[in-house]
Image: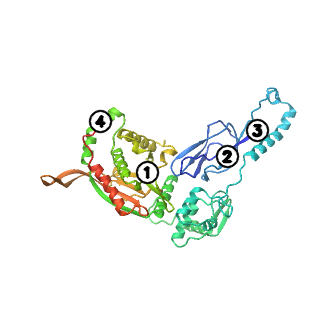
Amino acid sequence: MAIVDLVMPKLGESIMEATVLKWLKKPGDPVEMDETVLEIATDKVDSEVPSTAEGVIEEILFGENEVVPIGTVIARIKTKAENNSSNSPAQTAPSASYSETQPAQEAEVVETVKQTTARPQPTNGSAGRFYSPLVLNIAASEGVSMVELEKIPGTGNEGRVTKKDILQYVSGKKSGTGSAQPSVRTSDMVIPVAKVESTQKQEQQLGNYTGNVEVIEMDRMRKLIAEHMVRSKHTSPHVTSFTEADVTNMVLWRNRVKKDFEKREGTKITFTPLFVEAVVRCIKKFPLMNCSLDGDKIIVKKDINIGMATALPNGNLIVPVIKNADQLNLVGLAKQVNTLADNARNGKLKADDTQGGTFTMTNVGTFGSLMGTPIINQPQVAILAVGAIKKRPVVVETPHGDSIAIRHMMYLSMSYDHRIVDGSLGATFLTAVAKELENFNSDREF
Protein backbone atom coordinates (compact mmCIF):
# COMPACT_ATOMS: atom_id res chain seq x y z
CA MET A 1 0.00 0.00 0.00
CA ALA A 2 1.04 3.61 -0.55
CA ILE A 3 -0.39 6.95 0.52
CA VAL A 4 -1.17 9.69 -2.04
CA ASP A 5 -1.77 13.26 -0.92
CA LEU A 6 -4.79 15.09 -2.34
CA VAL A 7 -4.02 18.82 -2.40
CA MET A 8 -6.19 21.89 -2.83
CA PRO A 9 -5.83 22.63 -6.57
CA LYS A 10 -4.90 25.99 -8.06
CA LEU A 11 -8.10 27.40 -9.56
CA GLY A 12 -6.91 30.68 -11.01
CA GLU A 13 -4.04 33.12 -11.15
CA SER A 14 -5.19 35.29 -8.24
CA ILE A 15 -6.97 32.66 -6.13
CA MET A 16 -4.93 31.82 -3.03
CA GLU A 17 -7.48 29.91 -0.96
CA ALA A 18 -10.75 28.03 -1.20
CA THR A 19 -13.53 26.99 1.18
CA VAL A 20 -14.53 23.36 1.62
CA LEU A 21 -18.26 23.23 0.89
CA LYS A 22 -19.06 19.53 1.08
CA TRP A 23 -17.20 16.24 1.29
CA LEU A 24 -18.70 13.61 -1.00
CA LYS A 25 -16.49 10.89 0.48
CA LYS A 26 -15.58 9.95 4.03
CA PRO A 27 -12.67 7.97 5.49
CA GLY A 28 -12.92 4.35 4.43
CA ASP A 29 -14.84 5.06 1.22
CA PRO A 30 -13.38 3.71 -2.05
CA VAL A 31 -12.64 6.28 -4.74
CA GLU A 32 -11.87 5.99 -8.45
CA MET A 33 -9.37 8.02 -10.41
CA ASP A 34 -10.94 11.42 -11.36
CA GLU A 35 -14.01 10.73 -9.22
CA THR A 36 -15.26 13.84 -7.42
CA VAL A 37 -14.19 13.81 -3.76
CA LEU A 38 -15.39 17.19 -2.53
CA GLU A 39 -16.97 20.48 -3.56
CA ILE A 40 -15.13 23.73 -2.92
CA ALA A 41 -15.83 27.42 -3.37
CA THR A 42 -13.65 30.44 -4.06
CA ASP A 43 -14.62 34.07 -4.05
CA LYS A 44 -15.50 33.60 -7.73
CA VAL A 45 -17.10 30.26 -8.47
CA ASP A 46 -17.87 26.85 -7.00
CA SER A 47 -15.92 23.83 -8.26
CA GLU A 48 -15.37 20.12 -7.75
CA VAL A 49 -12.10 18.42 -6.78
CA PRO A 50 -11.47 15.01 -8.40
CA SER A 51 -9.36 12.23 -6.95
CA THR A 52 -5.80 12.01 -8.25
CA ALA A 53 -5.57 8.29 -7.53
CA GLU A 54 -7.61 5.12 -7.17
CA GLY A 55 -7.88 3.71 -3.68
CA VAL A 56 -9.54 4.31 -0.33
CA ILE A 57 -9.93 7.61 1.54
CA GLU A 58 -7.49 7.23 4.43
CA GLU A 59 -7.82 10.62 6.12
CA ILE A 60 -9.66 13.95 5.71
CA LEU A 61 -7.67 16.88 7.07
CA PHE A 62 -10.14 19.77 6.79
CA GLY A 63 -13.80 20.01 7.68
CA GLU A 64 -16.63 21.65 5.79
CA ASN A 65 -16.66 25.48 5.74
CA GLU A 66 -12.93 25.62 6.52
CA VAL A 67 -10.78 27.94 4.37
CA VAL A 68 -7.74 26.16 2.94
CA PRO A 69 -4.71 27.73 1.16
CA ILE A 70 -3.99 26.53 -2.37
CA GLY A 71 -1.49 23.65 -2.46
CA THR A 72 -2.33 22.40 1.03
CA VAL A 73 -2.91 18.68 1.57
CA ILE A 74 -6.63 18.24 2.27
CA ALA A 75 -6.93 14.44 2.29
CA ARG A 76 -4.91 11.26 1.94
CA ILE A 77 -5.75 8.30 -0.27
CA LYS A 78 -4.47 4.77 0.35
CA THR A 79 -3.64 3.07 -2.94
CA LYS A 80 -2.58 -0.44 -3.90
CA ALA A 81 1.13 -0.70 -4.69
CA GLU A 82 1.92 -2.40 -7.99
CA ASN A 83 3.79 -5.68 -7.78
CA ASN A 84 5.93 -6.54 -10.79
CA SER A 85 6.84 -10.09 -9.69
CA SER A 86 4.85 -12.66 -11.66
CA ASN A 87 5.22 -15.39 -9.03
CA SER A 88 4.63 -13.18 -6.02
CA PRO A 89 2.63 -14.78 -3.20
CA ALA A 90 0.28 -11.80 -3.45
CA GLN A 91 -0.81 -13.07 -6.87
CA THR A 92 -1.36 -16.64 -5.74
CA ALA A 93 -3.55 -17.99 -2.98
CA PRO A 94 -2.86 -15.94 0.15
CA SER A 95 -1.28 -17.85 3.02
CA ALA A 96 -1.65 -17.39 6.76
CA SER A 97 1.90 -16.09 7.06
CA TYR A 98 1.20 -13.47 4.35
CA SER A 99 -1.88 -12.15 6.11
CA GLU A 100 0.04 -11.88 9.37
CA THR A 101 2.94 -9.92 7.89
CA GLN A 102 0.86 -7.70 5.60
CA PRO A 103 0.06 -5.00 8.20
CA ALA A 104 3.72 -4.61 9.08
CA GLN A 105 4.67 -4.38 5.40
CA GLU A 106 1.96 -1.80 4.75
CA ALA A 107 3.07 0.30 7.71
CA GLU A 108 6.64 0.20 6.47
CA VAL A 109 5.66 1.31 2.95
CA VAL A 110 3.38 4.06 4.27
CA GLU A 111 6.10 5.35 6.56
CA THR A 112 8.59 5.38 3.68
CA VAL A 113 6.20 7.29 1.42
CA LYS A 114 5.46 9.82 4.15
CA GLN A 115 9.14 10.40 4.78
CA THR A 116 9.78 10.81 1.06
CA THR A 117 6.89 13.15 0.27
CA ALA A 118 6.63 15.10 3.51
CA ARG A 119 7.76 18.69 3.24
CA PRO A 120 8.62 20.97 6.13
CA GLN A 121 5.82 23.38 7.04
CA PRO A 122 6.45 26.53 4.97
CA THR A 123 7.15 29.68 6.91
CA ASN A 124 7.72 33.20 5.69
CA GLY A 125 7.47 35.25 8.86
CA SER A 126 10.16 36.09 11.40
CA ALA A 127 8.24 34.20 14.09
CA GLY A 128 8.01 31.06 11.96
CA ARG A 129 4.41 31.64 10.87
CA PHE A 130 3.21 31.07 7.33
CA TYR A 131 1.36 33.85 5.50
CA SER A 132 -0.45 33.28 2.22
CA PRO A 133 0.43 35.54 -0.74
CA LEU A 134 -3.04 37.08 -0.45
CA VAL A 135 -2.47 38.09 3.18
CA LEU A 136 0.97 39.48 2.35
CA ASN A 137 -0.43 41.48 -0.58
CA ILE A 138 -3.15 43.00 1.60
CA ALA A 139 -0.56 43.81 4.28
CA ALA A 140 1.68 45.53 1.73
CA SER A 141 -1.14 47.56 0.17
CA GLU A 142 -2.49 48.61 3.58
CA GLY A 143 0.90 49.48 5.08
CA VAL A 144 0.84 46.71 7.69
CA SER A 145 4.41 45.92 8.76
CA MET A 146 5.66 42.40 9.40
CA VAL A 147 5.98 43.28 13.08
CA GLU A 148 2.26 44.10 13.17
CA LEU A 149 1.43 41.04 11.12
CA GLU A 150 3.20 38.76 13.59
CA LYS A 151 0.99 40.11 16.40
CA ILE A 152 -2.35 39.54 14.66
CA PRO A 153 -4.12 36.50 16.15
CA GLY A 154 -4.96 33.98 13.44
CA THR A 155 -8.24 32.12 13.25
CA GLY A 156 -7.19 29.85 10.41
CA ASN A 157 -5.75 26.35 10.44
CA GLU A 158 -2.89 26.06 12.96
CA GLY A 159 -3.40 29.68 13.96
CA ARG A 160 -2.71 31.14 10.51
CA VAL A 161 -3.77 34.69 9.71
CA THR A 162 -6.63 34.57 7.21
CA LYS A 163 -7.84 37.24 4.81
CA LYS A 164 -10.71 37.98 7.19
CA ASP A 165 -8.29 38.42 10.11
CA ILE A 166 -6.09 40.99 8.39
CA LEU A 167 -9.02 42.90 6.86
CA GLN A 168 -10.60 43.10 10.31
CA TYR A 169 -7.29 44.36 11.72
CA VAL A 170 -6.94 46.96 8.94
CA SER A 171 -10.51 48.13 9.49
CA GLY A 172 -9.88 48.52 13.21
CA LYS A 173 -6.60 50.31 12.56
CA LYS A 174 -8.28 52.86 10.29
CA SER A 175 -10.99 53.49 12.87
CA GLY A 176 -8.37 54.05 15.56
CA THR A 177 -9.00 50.81 17.41
CA GLY A 178 -6.66 48.56 15.45
CA SER A 179 -4.21 46.61 17.56
CA ALA A 180 -3.31 43.01 18.03
CA GLN A 181 -5.96 41.80 20.45
CA PRO A 182 -5.40 39.06 23.02
CA SER A 183 -7.01 35.82 22.01
CA VAL A 184 -8.72 32.84 23.53
CA ARG A 185 -8.76 29.26 22.26
CA THR A 186 -12.11 27.65 21.61
CA SER A 187 -11.71 24.02 20.62
CA ASP A 188 -9.14 24.17 17.79
CA MET A 189 -9.73 27.83 16.89
CA VAL A 190 -7.89 30.87 18.19
CA ILE A 191 -10.34 33.77 18.43
CA PRO A 192 -9.46 37.34 19.46
CA VAL A 193 -11.06 38.39 22.75
CA ALA A 194 -12.52 41.48 21.06
CA LYS A 195 -14.13 39.24 18.46
CA VAL A 196 -15.56 36.96 21.15
CA GLU A 197 -17.02 39.95 23.01
CA SER A 198 -18.42 41.36 19.76
CA THR A 199 -19.99 38.01 18.91
CA GLN A 200 -21.51 37.77 22.38
CA LYS A 201 -23.00 41.26 22.02
CA GLN A 202 -24.42 40.35 18.63
CA GLU A 203 -25.94 37.19 20.09
CA GLN A 204 -27.47 39.22 22.90
CA GLN A 205 -28.95 41.66 20.40
CA LEU A 206 -30.24 38.90 18.15
CA GLY A 207 -34.02 38.72 18.29
CA ASN A 208 -34.42 42.22 19.73
CA TYR A 209 -36.12 43.47 16.58
CA THR A 210 -39.31 45.47 16.89
CA GLY A 211 -42.29 45.16 14.63
CA ASN A 212 -43.11 42.49 12.08
CA VAL A 213 -39.74 41.46 10.61
CA GLU A 214 -38.15 38.54 8.79
CA VAL A 215 -34.50 37.68 9.48
CA ILE A 216 -32.69 36.24 6.44
CA GLU A 217 -29.23 34.72 6.77
CA MET A 218 -26.92 35.83 3.96
CA ASP A 219 -25.74 32.99 1.75
CA ARG A 220 -22.04 32.39 1.17
CA MET A 221 -21.88 34.28 -2.10
CA ARG A 222 -23.65 37.32 -0.67
CA LYS A 223 -21.20 37.37 2.25
CA LEU A 224 -18.29 37.30 -0.20
CA ILE A 225 -19.80 40.10 -2.28
CA ALA A 226 -20.31 42.19 0.86
CA GLU A 227 -16.72 41.58 1.92
CA HIS A 228 -15.38 42.56 -1.51
CA MET A 229 -17.43 45.74 -1.64
CA VAL A 230 -16.24 46.87 1.79
CA ARG A 231 -12.66 45.97 0.92
CA SER A 232 -12.85 47.93 -2.34
CA LYS A 233 -14.08 51.04 -0.55
CA HIS A 234 -11.31 50.66 2.05
CA THR A 235 -8.69 50.18 -0.66
CA SER A 236 -9.55 52.77 -3.33
CA PRO A 237 -10.65 56.38 -2.96
CA HIS A 238 -13.62 56.33 -5.34
CA VAL A 239 -14.45 59.20 -7.68
CA THR A 240 -17.41 58.98 -10.09
CA SER A 241 -17.83 61.00 -13.28
CA PHE A 242 -20.99 61.23 -15.40
CA THR A 243 -21.84 61.99 -19.01
CA GLU A 244 -24.57 61.20 -21.54
CA ALA A 245 -24.54 59.90 -25.09
CA ASP A 246 -26.91 60.08 -28.01
CA VAL A 247 -27.02 56.42 -29.09
CA THR A 248 -29.78 56.82 -31.68
CA ASN A 249 -27.63 55.53 -34.56
CA MET A 250 -26.69 52.44 -32.55
CA VAL A 251 -30.28 51.69 -31.54
CA LEU A 252 -31.61 52.05 -35.09
CA TRP A 253 -28.78 49.90 -36.51
CA ARG A 254 -29.41 47.11 -33.98
CA ASN A 255 -33.16 47.17 -34.64
CA ARG A 256 -32.48 46.84 -38.34
CA VAL A 257 -29.96 43.97 -38.25
CA LYS A 258 -30.85 41.90 -35.16
CA LYS A 259 -33.02 39.34 -37.00
CA ASP A 260 -30.49 38.80 -39.79
CA PHE A 261 -27.65 38.72 -37.26
CA GLU A 262 -29.27 35.94 -35.23
CA LYS A 263 -30.21 34.00 -38.35
CA ARG A 264 -26.69 34.15 -39.80
CA GLU A 265 -24.57 33.88 -36.66
CA GLY A 266 -26.80 31.75 -34.45
CA THR A 267 -26.67 34.18 -31.54
CA LYS A 268 -28.42 37.39 -30.53
CA ILE A 269 -26.90 40.84 -30.86
CA THR A 270 -27.44 42.83 -27.66
CA PHE A 271 -26.11 46.26 -26.75
CA THR A 272 -23.41 44.81 -24.48
CA PRO A 273 -20.91 43.79 -27.21
CA LEU A 274 -21.39 47.23 -28.81
CA PHE A 275 -20.54 48.88 -25.49
CA VAL A 276 -17.53 46.58 -25.00
CA GLU A 277 -16.30 47.39 -28.50
CA ALA A 278 -16.36 51.13 -27.71
CA VAL A 279 -14.61 50.64 -24.35
CA VAL A 280 -11.83 48.59 -25.95
CA ARG A 281 -11.13 51.29 -28.53
CA CYS A 282 -10.86 53.92 -25.80
CA ILE A 283 -8.62 51.78 -23.59
CA LYS A 284 -6.17 51.60 -26.50
CA LYS A 285 -6.12 55.40 -26.50
CA PHE A 286 -5.85 55.65 -22.71
CA PRO A 287 -3.88 52.57 -21.54
CA LEU A 288 -3.60 53.84 -17.96
CA MET A 289 -7.26 52.95 -17.49
CA ASN A 290 -6.26 49.31 -17.94
CA CYS A 291 -3.95 48.88 -14.97
CA SER A 292 -3.67 47.95 -11.30
CA LEU A 293 -1.68 49.23 -8.33
CA ASP A 294 0.92 47.15 -6.50
CA GLY A 295 2.19 49.20 -3.56
CA ASP A 296 3.70 52.26 -5.24
CA LYS A 297 4.01 50.58 -8.63
CA ILE A 298 1.48 51.03 -11.45
CA ILE A 299 1.06 47.81 -13.43
CA VAL A 300 -0.21 48.63 -16.93
CA LYS A 301 -1.91 45.57 -18.45
CA LYS A 302 -1.22 44.86 -22.11
CA ASP A 303 -4.08 42.37 -22.32
CA ILE A 304 -7.54 43.92 -22.49
CA ASN A 305 -9.87 41.62 -20.57
CA ILE A 306 -13.30 43.12 -20.01
CA GLY A 307 -15.36 41.94 -17.06
CA MET A 308 -19.13 42.18 -17.45
CA ALA A 309 -21.19 42.22 -14.27
CA THR A 310 -23.97 39.62 -14.57
CA ALA A 311 -26.98 39.21 -12.28
CA LEU A 312 -27.76 35.66 -11.19
CA PRO A 313 -31.29 34.26 -10.70
CA ASN A 314 -30.87 34.39 -6.90
CA GLY A 315 -30.08 38.11 -7.01
CA ASN A 316 -26.33 37.75 -6.51
CA LEU A 317 -23.76 39.14 -8.90
CA ILE A 318 -20.81 37.59 -10.72
CA VAL A 319 -18.33 39.06 -13.20
CA PRO A 320 -17.28 36.72 -16.05
CA VAL A 321 -14.42 38.03 -18.18
CA ILE A 322 -14.12 38.43 -21.95
CA LYS A 323 -10.45 37.56 -22.51
CA ASN A 324 -8.48 39.50 -25.15
CA ALA A 325 -11.55 41.51 -26.11
CA ASP A 326 -9.44 43.68 -28.41
CA GLN A 327 -8.76 40.67 -30.64
CA LEU A 328 -12.44 39.86 -31.24
CA ASN A 329 -14.69 41.33 -33.90
CA LEU A 330 -18.32 42.18 -33.16
CA VAL A 331 -19.54 38.64 -33.88
CA GLY A 332 -16.90 37.19 -31.57
CA LEU A 333 -17.79 39.64 -28.83
CA ALA A 334 -21.50 38.84 -29.17
CA LYS A 335 -20.88 35.11 -28.89
CA GLN A 336 -18.58 35.55 -25.89
CA VAL A 337 -21.05 37.83 -24.11
CA ASN A 338 -23.98 35.46 -24.64
CA THR A 339 -22.03 32.31 -23.74
CA LEU A 340 -20.62 33.76 -20.53
CA ALA A 341 -23.97 35.22 -19.50
CA ASP A 342 -25.76 31.91 -20.10
CA ASN A 343 -23.11 29.92 -18.24
CA ALA A 344 -23.27 32.34 -15.32
CA ARG A 345 -27.04 32.03 -14.99
CA ASN A 346 -26.88 28.22 -15.30
CA GLY A 347 -24.01 27.78 -12.85
CA LYS A 348 -21.64 26.47 -15.54
CA LEU A 349 -18.87 29.06 -15.25
CA LYS A 350 -15.35 27.72 -14.75
CA ALA A 351 -12.93 29.31 -12.30
CA ASP A 352 -10.87 30.72 -15.18
CA ASP A 353 -13.96 32.46 -16.62
CA THR A 354 -13.90 35.00 -13.79
CA GLN A 355 -10.14 35.58 -13.63
CA GLY A 356 -7.83 38.13 -15.19
CA GLY A 357 -10.22 41.04 -15.71
CA THR A 358 -8.54 44.39 -16.34
CA PHE A 359 -11.60 46.66 -16.68
CA THR A 360 -15.25 46.07 -15.75
CA MET A 361 -18.53 47.22 -17.24
CA THR A 362 -21.95 46.93 -15.63
CA ASN A 363 -25.28 47.57 -17.34
CA VAL A 364 -27.50 49.11 -14.66
CA GLY A 365 -29.97 50.06 -17.39
CA THR A 366 -31.04 46.41 -17.61
CA PHE A 367 -33.07 46.99 -14.44
CA GLY A 368 -34.36 50.40 -15.47
CA SER A 369 -31.79 52.60 -13.72
CA LEU A 370 -30.78 55.78 -15.50
CA MET A 371 -27.32 55.83 -13.92
CA GLY A 372 -25.33 54.42 -11.02
CA THR A 373 -22.20 54.87 -8.91
CA PRO A 374 -20.54 51.44 -9.26
CA ILE A 375 -17.89 50.09 -6.88
CA ILE A 376 -14.51 49.21 -8.39
CA ASN A 377 -13.78 45.52 -8.93
CA GLN A 378 -10.39 45.18 -7.22
CA PRO A 379 -7.56 45.22 -8.19
CA GLN A 380 -8.76 47.14 -11.26
CA VAL A 381 -8.83 50.93 -11.25
CA ALA A 382 -12.13 51.70 -12.98
CA ILE A 383 -15.63 50.41 -13.64
CA LEU A 384 -18.10 51.78 -16.19
CA ALA A 385 -21.87 51.76 -15.71
CA VAL A 386 -24.28 52.25 -18.61
CA GLY A 387 -27.84 53.30 -17.87
CA ALA A 388 -31.18 52.69 -19.51
CA ILE A 389 -31.67 54.02 -23.03
CA LYS A 390 -34.58 56.47 -23.04
CA LYS A 391 -36.21 58.58 -25.73
CA ARG A 392 -35.94 62.25 -24.85
CA PRO A 393 -36.40 65.58 -26.63
CA VAL A 394 -32.95 67.11 -27.09
CA VAL A 395 -31.44 70.05 -28.93
CA VAL A 396 -29.77 68.89 -32.16
CA GLU A 397 -27.25 71.12 -33.90
CA THR A 398 -27.57 71.14 -37.70
CA PRO A 399 -26.01 73.23 -40.51
CA HIS A 400 -29.34 75.03 -40.70
CA GLY A 401 -29.48 75.82 -37.00
CA ASP A 402 -30.60 74.18 -33.79
CA SER A 403 -33.72 72.08 -33.58
CA ILE A 404 -35.45 69.85 -31.06
CA ALA A 405 -35.67 66.16 -31.92
CA ILE A 406 -36.59 62.88 -30.23
CA ARG A 407 -33.37 60.97 -29.65
CA HIS A 408 -32.30 57.77 -27.85
CA MET A 409 -30.24 59.02 -24.90
CA MET A 410 -28.18 57.12 -22.33
CA TYR A 411 -26.26 58.18 -19.22
CA LEU A 412 -22.82 56.75 -18.53
CA SER A 413 -21.05 56.84 -15.18
CA MET A 414 -17.58 55.65 -14.25
CA SER A 415 -16.02 55.16 -10.83
CA TYR A 416 -12.23 55.19 -10.74
CA ASP A 417 -9.37 54.90 -8.26
CA HIS A 418 -8.22 58.43 -7.49
CA ARG A 419 -4.80 57.16 -6.39
CA ILE A 420 -4.00 56.52 -10.05
CA VAL A 421 -6.69 58.11 -12.21
CA ASP A 422 -7.14 61.87 -11.80
CA GLY A 423 -10.35 63.64 -12.73
CA SER A 424 -8.94 64.89 -16.01
CA LEU A 425 -8.06 61.40 -17.24
CA GLY A 426 -11.23 59.82 -15.87
CA ALA A 427 -13.54 62.43 -17.40
CA THR A 428 -11.63 62.44 -20.70
CA PHE A 429 -11.84 58.65 -21.00
CA LEU A 430 -15.55 58.61 -20.17
CA THR A 431 -16.23 61.35 -22.73
CA ALA A 432 -14.27 59.37 -25.32
CA VAL A 433 -16.46 56.32 -24.73
CA ALA A 434 -19.58 58.48 -25.14
CA LYS A 435 -18.23 59.90 -28.41
CA GLU A 436 -17.49 56.39 -29.72
CA LEU A 437 -21.12 55.45 -29.09
CA GLU A 438 -22.47 58.65 -30.62
CA ASN A 439 -20.33 58.26 -33.73
CA PHE A 440 -21.52 54.72 -34.32
CA ASN A 441 -21.54 53.90 -38.04
CA SER A 442 -25.13 53.00 -38.86
CA ASP A 443 -24.09 51.75 -42.31
CA ARG A 444 -21.64 49.14 -41.02
CA GLU A 445 -21.92 45.44 -41.70
CA PHE A 446 -21.73 42.87 -38.92
Secondary structure at numbered mark 2: strand
Q: Is residue 24 left or right of residue 342?
A: right
Please identify the quarter of the rendering in which residue 243 is found: bottom left
Secondary structure under tag 4 reads helix
Q: Helix, strand, or loop for circle 1? A: loop
At 58% from the left edge and 51% from the top edge, which residue is drawn? 19
The residue at which mark 2 appears reads as 75
At label 3, counting other C-alpha atoms closer than 10 Å, the crowd grade (few under 14, some 14-19, many 20 or more) is: some
Farthest-out residue, right: 97
Q: Which mark is residue 259?
A: 4
- Of labels 1 and 2, earlier in sequence is 2
Query: x and y percent of residue 414 in the render?
Result: 36, 57
Q: Earlier in the sequence, mark 1 or mark 3?
A: 3
Mark 1 vs mark 3, CA separation in Å: 49 Å
User: Distance of mark 4 from mark 3, alpha carbons?
Assistant: 63 Å
Disc 1 from disc 2: Cα separation? 34 Å
Indicate the amino acid at tag 2: Ala
Coloring applied to the structure: rainbow
Question: Which residue is found at the position 85% from the left and 37% from the top?
Answer: 101
| Circle 2 residues within 10 Å: few <14, some 14–19, many ≥20 | many
Query: Most extreme residue toward the bottom, as rendered?
Result: 176
